[in-house]
Amino acid sequence: MTRHDKSQEIMRRSREIFPGGVNSPVRAFGGVGGTPVVAARGEGCRLIDADGNAYLDFVLSWGPLVLGHAPPAVLDALHEAMTAGTSFGMPTEWELRLGALIRERLPHMERLRFVSSGTEATMSAVRVARAQTRRDGILKFDGCYHGHADSFLVKAGSGVATLGLPNSPGVPAALAELTLVTPYNDIAAAERLMAEQGGRVAAIIVEPVVGNAGFIPPDPAFLPALRRLADAHGALLIFDEVMTGFRIAPAGAPERFGVNPDLTTLGKVIGGGLPVAAYGGRADLMDAVAPAGPVYQAGTLSGNPLAMAAGHATLRMLTRELHAKIEARTARLVQGLREIAARRGVPFSADHAGSMWGFFFRAEPVRNFADARTSDTELFKRFFHEALARGVYLAPSPFEAAFMSAAHGDDDVAEALNRMDDALGAARG
Ligand code: PLP
């Protein structure tokens, strides 16, 4: 039996200092019950908690750690950057290096701006879209999460759904009204909405593969339809690739799905575990951003040299070859889970795109958030805890994607499958 005395003690004290004991809600285990395990350190694909228990980690800090924990290349880059100083509030060559590397890999991001969180990136991209179209509305999809800016806390999936907060108090109704919502993968609903209200929509924003309502891939026709609809109604198309960027394909959603957005947001992987995000896209749109243009957006720590160095080292390591290797291991894990569930007679569906994956306890594939909510979330909770007890760390919510890293070797995948097989047996009772 694993013990969690120290985690429990740290959480008890943390609850006196932080709301709910945490600095981001979904960490609190609200979706699965129990007390969170407290992280002490990471080694490759393993996470070690405050009591010294080790876990095969499939959360990876919610996506950023595509090379695993504490990769030497990132630590070396951090050390080099750190010894020169931690922040300047001036342009540095670190920014140029990471910016140029991103543009080389994602040429549709003709101009980009670094910020420090995905929330800032999506909020700023929408500001650009509103300024450029002189419209105020946005269309988003039920279950997609685009950070916690006021405009997006409407049917926002994952953390919000897990905690049972469909909308957030504190978001002005007048602003929420500008956010139109239709179901993911429902082309007819998006067409209807755009036919009625397209004239007030500045942007259609979408997770090209949903990770925040569990893992939900787009139907083949969905993203092309959104491109068509945006064009037909004079709106911009924003791909929120904060989670999918450098996960679903080396060159992102445009490579995987053959659809180009006008604007893209990135986060997570591009910071290699430090706080970095970005928004960017067509130069004629991005040149509206201050000081090139009038759309204001700024940040004291934007382009921070340590964060830039960590991101640059991460992306340099993440070659096409490495991406393909991680994707193959992800496919093996997902296939293994399907086989385990089938052998045990458990209704189950699982899928992956690149190194992003997920599963639901439901026989039919999930196409939208309403489907996701019909999965067996009680079985998920039991499975989560049984997996945790066997040293497998999954996201503490049935509505979150999982990830894989370069540090997960073939043996680790096999070990994870064995442990999850046992965990599923125990969870079924
Ligand atoms: N957009 C997507 C698709 C995300 O998954 C997230 C976070 O999980 C965000 C935006 C917000 O990013 P951050 O948590 O860095 O503010």
Image (cartoon, rainbow, N blue to C red):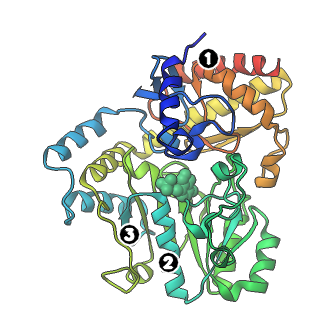
Which numbered circle lies on residue 67? none
Amino acid type of the residue tagged 1 in the rendering: Arg
In the depicted view, which residue is nearer to us: 231 or 23? 23
* Amino acid type assigned to the residue bearing label 2 in the image: Arg
Q: Which mark is residue 390?
A: 1
The answer, for residue 188, to whether it is visible in the render is: yes
- Mark number, residue 112: 3
Q: Residue at x 62, y 59 (%)?
A: 208
At which x and y percent is residue 351? Answer: 69, 41
Say above or below: 169 vs 394.
below
Is residue 256 found left or right of 363 in the rendered image? left
Secondary element at image label 2? helix
Q: Quadrant of the C terminus?
A: top right
Tell me which residue sits at (81%, 78%) in the image.
Answer: 192
Question: Which residue is nearer to you in this view: 192 or 51?
Answer: 51
Mark 3 element type: strand
